[in-house]
Image: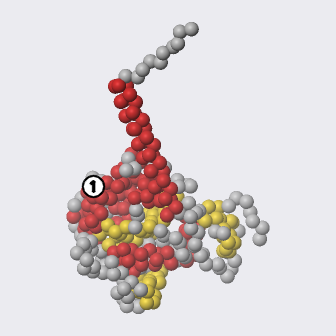
Amino acid sequence: MARTEKKKMSKGTKTLFIVVCVLVGLALLLAATVFTLSYIGRSSLTGDDTMNLPENADTSFESLGSGTIRRNGKLYRYNDEITCILLMGIDSYDKQSDGNYAPHQSDVNVLAVIDPKNEKLTLLSVSRDTLCELDIVDENGNMTGTAEAQLALAYNYGGSDDESCRLTATAVSRIFYGLNIPAYASIYMNGISDLVDIVGGVTVTPSDNFNGFAAGKQVELKGNLTERYIRFRDYSVDGNNKRMQRQNQVLKALVYKALSVAKSDPTSVLDIYSSVQDNVTTNINTAMMIYLARQAVDLKYDGQILTVPGHSEMGEQDHAVFVIDEEAFLDQIIEIFYDQVKNEIPS
């Protein structure tokens, strides 16, 4: 019987085969790297249920342990897949890079709640005037005590932007009964203006006349118009509440555009960040960014920015303060951070 000879592969075919194998290997390596970084990012951002909600004397609320609570006869369990990021807008134009840090305040404080289980993004604005417990630190960063003051002042007590961010995140965590806030980002005024310009501008409609803007007349914000729109504040009890409404308009428009960009190209998030990073301080690393970008593909955003419920009043030193409505706030927290449990647990 004649022996069948194997057809030899030509030199060109061998080269092509090797190139294809290398490309496939690189693709698999890249996919594995993205998956690994995404997993690391998820581990850094989720999995904590440290909220210590206050139990009421009238038994309308009860903690049952392991993240489970009973409120008005219904059971809820903390959603441990949630990620919380505190976003801060700073009341100064540029972030200093010469090492001579000057204290500032956070005019905007928005908690971004990313819920991949329910495919939902929730933005919750916390008034800068909210009375809360702040940490006081010395020049070496050592905590020396606490003080009750407006939330905006937490950023002022830091000796660097990183420390100021951490102090503000701690203050917001206390407002939310110990909520885990593993990530933060602060941005200065020029950074916000740059961000608006990068996405091609945003369109808003003022609700009143102020600073050259006319009530009901639509305007496209670009360049210095953005700063003029979001920074103006009239000095009345509700002056900051009106400013928050305008800031929320701009933020909503930015979120829509950012989500659209992330869904079409998740890696573009890194490009957007690199264009404004000189005026940004954040502890969100590459692994976290990749995880968040991957989650953004499936997230739904209803276009609303919620506000912590409460009212403004004049404080002891003739400064407006925001006082939280604790009962309404508790219901809001349960709505955002907890899932209802269908199977009743015996009392």
Query: Is 229 placed left or right of 154 in the picture?
Result: left
Here the colouring is: secondary structure
Q: How far across and down, in percent of the image, does residue 176 sit?
A: 52, 74
Evaluate whether residue 260 shows in this view: no
Quadrant into which the N terminus falls: top right
Question: Neighbour class for label 1 at 10 Å: few (<14), some, many (≥20)?
Answer: few
Please name whichever residue, 130 or 313, is drawn nearer the observer in this view of the structure: 130
Against 295, is 46 above or below? Answer: below
Please name whichever residue, 4 or 127, is drawn nearer the observer in this view of the structure: 4
Residue at x 40% of width, y 38% of height: 22
Evaluate whether residue 42 shows in this view: yes
Give SS at disc 1. helix
**Which residue in the rendered view is the most extreme toward the right?**
346
Query: Is 31 placed left or right of 77 in the picture?
Result: left
Q: Which residue is mark 1?
A: 198
**Which residue in the rendered view is the most extreme toward the top?**
1
Q: How many marks?
A: 1
